[in-house]
Image (spheres, rainbow, N blue to C red):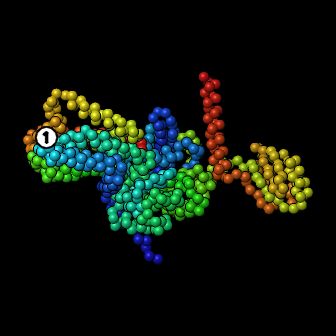
């Protein structure tokens, strides 16, 4: 735990961004990110994830509230604070006619790094991201994977303490995505990361904390484990083995139990949905007993739906239904 | 086990980001089609007009004064090619907003340095090119036409026109920082520059005297100039350019990119 606000990597207080008095992009977001945290920023399209990251970088100016990074207020001219941050935008753009060497040299100059530091560092990074063979070629002809690797190198050129990566796996093929996730895992051992992604599987794999934005509001901030803990575990799939008649008999017996909303058998796969008031441990214990009584073997059991995704969807759904309730109450009062 | 080696703190060069933006923008300007078109049009106009004057002298025997050729070309430069200079400068910041500007402004550079780098790069590119083309034209006219010019006067005429171009460039870069839309920025600067120019032209002669230098260019080129008026022109132009830049820089440092 960070002992004082000075120890926090990012701290926002009542952060609000309203575009031209027309669109509320971020609404009253108070968030604290501690050193070593790998934060997954989640939210549906238009939730305000990119706006939040841009506010943290000083690319946008808050309408109200503030952002502090490494204990210092982030502003458009806070170059000293940005020297400790590595950023990858959603779709990184590169100046025309530049090669990876000239681009990284330009980025290093923007951080004020002297020649004896920046030249060896850019050479090491080009080698590390496997662009050595094309280091003198124009970036214009690069594939998505190559530009993503170059963007990673650019975000690491200043050896930052905080990495802010906006959709780093966007547009990557399976192999490139896998490499990116491995890189995030490696970097997370010594740096603080904020990763925004639509792909909840990615967040689940690499992050230890999550923040969920919905319509500009922070609806969850905490550990990923806690987020998963909020998930309604009421839908399971069981793969069975044994005599088909015995499986059918067991299914009929399970249908007779009061804990289940629905019980369906497809070949040897049993799908069960629990009632809202049922406890999953006792309900599943009853299922196991019934299967054992009918001499049916259980091959595997799994909770249906990707866990983080389900928890995230539950949160957003809950927040939206609260919104409808609020609107209803306001109308009623009027 | 060996003790871990402490990482030596990197000595940051605070003005390196400014130079990086300056160098990159200068290169991009020289590569842009608007710049190349402007240079091509200026060179072709100078060569064509000089060819016409030389032909008139050789064919009809009418003496052609280098001072008239130089002052005509300088006037055309101000009136004609300013449109291209506006296009070249009024998109310098707005055209990169939301894409390339993200990659630059998210690094260790302040908005002030970014604006100054852009502004100075455009000033050096346009005014430097103007001086190069101007000096070559003056030298050619000395050899090909009746050399009635003074070198000091010619250079002062170039300085006077460059001072006016400086205002246009500063105006262009400032409005590119103010407007998000490049076309809107170009339109506003174009209307403003030509509007102010037309208003000054309508004012009584010698009011304000420093901005009526275009009408007295033939005399200046011949060496018949009032140094204090030229000095005031350059001083006022520099002041107006700086005020425009400060306004643009202040606005840009407070807005979203």
Give SS at disc 1: helix
In the rendering, at what x and y percent does residue B36 appear?
Answer: 32, 50
Q: Residue at x 16, y 32 (%)?
A: B208
Furthest residue toward top: A334
Q: Residue at x 22, y 52 (%)?
A: B132
Q: In the rendered image, is residue B237 in sight? A: no
Please tell me which residue lies in front, B131 or B59: B59
Q: In the rendered image, is residue A312 in sight? A: yes
Which residue is disc 1 drawn over?
Answer: B218
Q: Quadrant of residue B13?
A: bottom left
Please tell me which residue lies in front, B175 or B157: B157
Please tell me which residue lies in front, A35 or B16: B16
In the rendering, at what x and y percent does residue A237 appear?
Answer: 77, 54
Lateral position of residue A3 relative to residue B69, left or right: right
In the rendering, at what x and y percent does residue A162 appear?
Answer: 46, 56
Please tell me which residue lies in front, A5 or A77: A77
* Badge 1: chain ID: B
Lateral position of residue B90 relative to residue A41, left or right: left
């Amino acid at each position: 735990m960070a002992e004082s606000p000075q120890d926090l990597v990012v701290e926002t207080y009542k952060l609000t961004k309203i575009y031209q008095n027309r669109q509320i992009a971020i609404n009253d977001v108070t968030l604290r990110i501690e050193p070593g945290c790998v934060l997954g920023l989640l939210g549906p399209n238009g939730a305000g994830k990119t706006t939040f990251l841009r506010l943290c970088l000083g690319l946008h100016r808050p309408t109200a509230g503030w952002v502090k990074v490494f204990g210092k207020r982030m502003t458009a001219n806070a170059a000293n604070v940005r020297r400790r941050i590595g950023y990858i935008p959603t779709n990184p753009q590169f100046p025309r006619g530049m090669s990876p060497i000239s681009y990284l040299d330009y980025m290093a100059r923007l951080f004020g790094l002297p020649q004896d530091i920046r030249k060896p560092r850019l050479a090491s990074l080009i080698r590390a991201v496997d662009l050595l063979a094309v280091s003198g070629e124009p970036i214009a002809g690069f594939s998505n994977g190559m530009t993503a690797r170059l963007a990673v190198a650019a975000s690491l050129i200043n050896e930052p303490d905080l990495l802010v990566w906006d959709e780093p796996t966007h547009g990557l093929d399976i192999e490139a995505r896998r490499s990116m996730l491995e890189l995030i895992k490696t970097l997370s051992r010594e740096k603080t990361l904020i990763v925004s992604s639509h792909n909840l599987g990615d967040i689940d794999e690499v992050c230890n904390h999550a923040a969920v934005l919905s319509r500009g509001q922070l609806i969850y901030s905490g550990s990923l484990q806690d987020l998963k803990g909020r998930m309604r575990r009421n839908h399971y799939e069981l793969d069975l083995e044994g005599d088909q008649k015995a499986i059918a008999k067991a299914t009929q017996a399970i249908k007779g139990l009061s804990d289940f909303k629905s019980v369906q058998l497809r070949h040897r796969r049993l799908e069960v949905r629990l009632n809202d008031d049922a406890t999953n441990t006792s309900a599943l214990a009853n299922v196991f007993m019934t299967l054992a009584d009918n001499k049916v073997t259980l091959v595997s059991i799994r909770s249906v739906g990707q866990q983080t995704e389900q928890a995230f969807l539950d949160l957003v759904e809950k927040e939206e239904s609260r919104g409808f309730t609020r609107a209803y109450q306001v109308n009623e009062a009027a | 086990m060996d003790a871990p080696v402490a990482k030596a703190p990197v000595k940051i060069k605070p003005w390196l980001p400014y130079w990086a933006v300056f160098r990159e923008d200068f290169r991009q300007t020289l590569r842009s089609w608007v710049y190349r078109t402007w240079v091509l049009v200026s060179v072709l106009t100078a060569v064509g007009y000089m060819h016409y004057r030389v032909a008139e002298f050789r064919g009809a025997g009418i003496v052609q004064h280098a001072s008239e050729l130089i002052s005509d070309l300088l006037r055309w430069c101000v009136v004609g090619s300013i449109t291209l200079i506006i296009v070249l400068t009024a998109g310098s910041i707005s055209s990169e907003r939301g894409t390339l500007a993200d990659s630059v402004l998210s690094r260790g550079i302040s908005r002030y340095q970014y604006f100054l780098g852009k502004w100075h790069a455009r000033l050096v590119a346009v005014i430097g090119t103007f001086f190069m083309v101007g000096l070559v034209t003056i030298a050619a006219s000395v050899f090909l036409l009746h050399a009635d010019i003074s070198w000091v006067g010619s250079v002062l005429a170039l300085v006077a026109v460059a001072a006016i171009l400086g205002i246009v460039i500063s105006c262009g870069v400032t409005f590119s920082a103010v407007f998000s839309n490049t076309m809107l920025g170009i339109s506003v600067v174009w209307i403003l520059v030509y509007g102010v120019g037309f208003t000054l032209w309508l004012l009584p002669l010698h009011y304000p005297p420093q901005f009526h230098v275009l009408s007295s260019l033939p005399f200046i080129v011949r060496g018949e100039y009032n140094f204090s008026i030229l000095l005031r022109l350059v001083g006022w132009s520099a002041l107006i350019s700086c005020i425009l830049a400060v306004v643009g820089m202040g606005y840009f440092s407070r807005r979203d990119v």
